[in-house]
Amino acid sequence: MMEENFRRIADTVRLPEGSRARIRAQVASWAEEQEASMQNKPKKRLPRLAVAAIIIAAALTLTAAAAAVVHRFRNDIIVSSISELPAPTEDTPMAVAVVTDSQSAAQTLDEILAEGPYITAEEWESGEKIGGTTSAQYGGWDTAELISSDPALSVRRITREIDGAEKMQYMAEDPADLLPVLTGKIRFDLTWLAEHYSVVIPDDQAYIIRDEDGAFVSEYFSAAYGAKDGKGWVSLDMDYDTTRKGLGPSYIVNGTFDQAYYYTTQDGYEFLITASHDKVWASCYTDHAAVSLYGAYLTTGDLEQIVEHLSVSIAE
């Protein structure tokens, strides 16, 4: 009976399947050893419950990092109806229900390309379009200094007069060339994505904001890829903001989207995946980090593949 109880614990604790299998195997092995030892060593030994508890504790220690990852996500919460939304209190703001513009048609890849890049090489070099920030506390930029206009990796230093804060902005033809300039707060791999999709917008960007003392504030990365069929596409956005404050959870009412569910990668990162008509989304939020994908004419299965192969890792 006791072994069954601990097997049930191994199955119900929210851990990766590999961890649960390891716990079950350790409990089974312990049970076999105990039965054999009972015939030869009837003297002092730990109570069976204590021994099993030690095994469970040791196994949980081995997977503590994975468990910590699972519990820190701040993704939207799926509920079955509006009536499940919690009432606001003094400590909890009014719940927000997320809806989608499901009636509007998704843009095709050709339509995206026809719009052109967000910022041209001329605008980059002249110092235009210097706004954009991942932190509401660090907007209102004033001047831009061109450091490099090399298409392989263009660099600008953007500052604001009010306090001397600095934003280093980067643009590259290949999004992978932006990864070395990032801080590593969010780590990810673009290799698989580049092999199965094509870079489609020549203004893939990244920027890092530091305060007047040079301390890190936030960073941002953006890139877009087109599917091999010439119609589907996906945009990828990563940002990490030390000034982000929790505003309370938001909710998705089941049925608002065609699909809404959680997908956990092999590395233990939980993504909320949603779909509405020809549009798909995937997002993974923590207190300070946001990994967001938005695509069109792709399936939720396509997004699962992408987020799995991104091998996301968030340091907090």
Image (cartoon, rainbow, N blue to C red):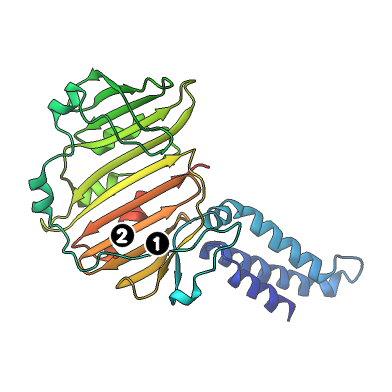
Report the side of 166 relative to 236 (left or right). Answer: right
Question: What secondary structure is found at the residue carrying circle 1?
Answer: strand
Amino acid of disc 2: Trp
Amino acid of disc 1: Leu
Image height check: is 37 above or below 286?
A: below
Report the side of 276 relative to 87 (left or right). Answer: left
**Residue at the extreme bottom of the image, as rendered:** 1
Residue under the point 23% across and 53% down: 234
User: Would you name the residue on which mark 2 appears?
Assistant: 281
Q: Nearer the viewer, residue 29 or 60?
A: 60
User: What's the CA distance linking mark 2 and mark 1?
Assistant: 8 Å
Image height check: is 218 above or below 85?
A: above
Q: Quadrant of the N terminus?
A: bottom right
Residue under the point 52% across and 50% down: 246
The disc, 2 or 1, on the residue closer to the chain's N-terminal end is: 1
Residue 272 is tagged as 1
Question: What secondary structure is found at the residue carrying circle 2?
Answer: strand
Location of residue 173 in the rendering, given as x and y in whole percent from the top left corner: 19, 34
Alpha-carbon neighbours of circle 1 within 10 Å: few (<14), some, or many (≥20)? many
Location of residue 237 in the rendering, given as x and y in whole percent from the top left corner: 32, 46
**Residue 282: quarter of image:** bottom left
Q: Is residue 276 visible?
A: yes
Dots 2, 1 in contact, CB < 8 A: yes
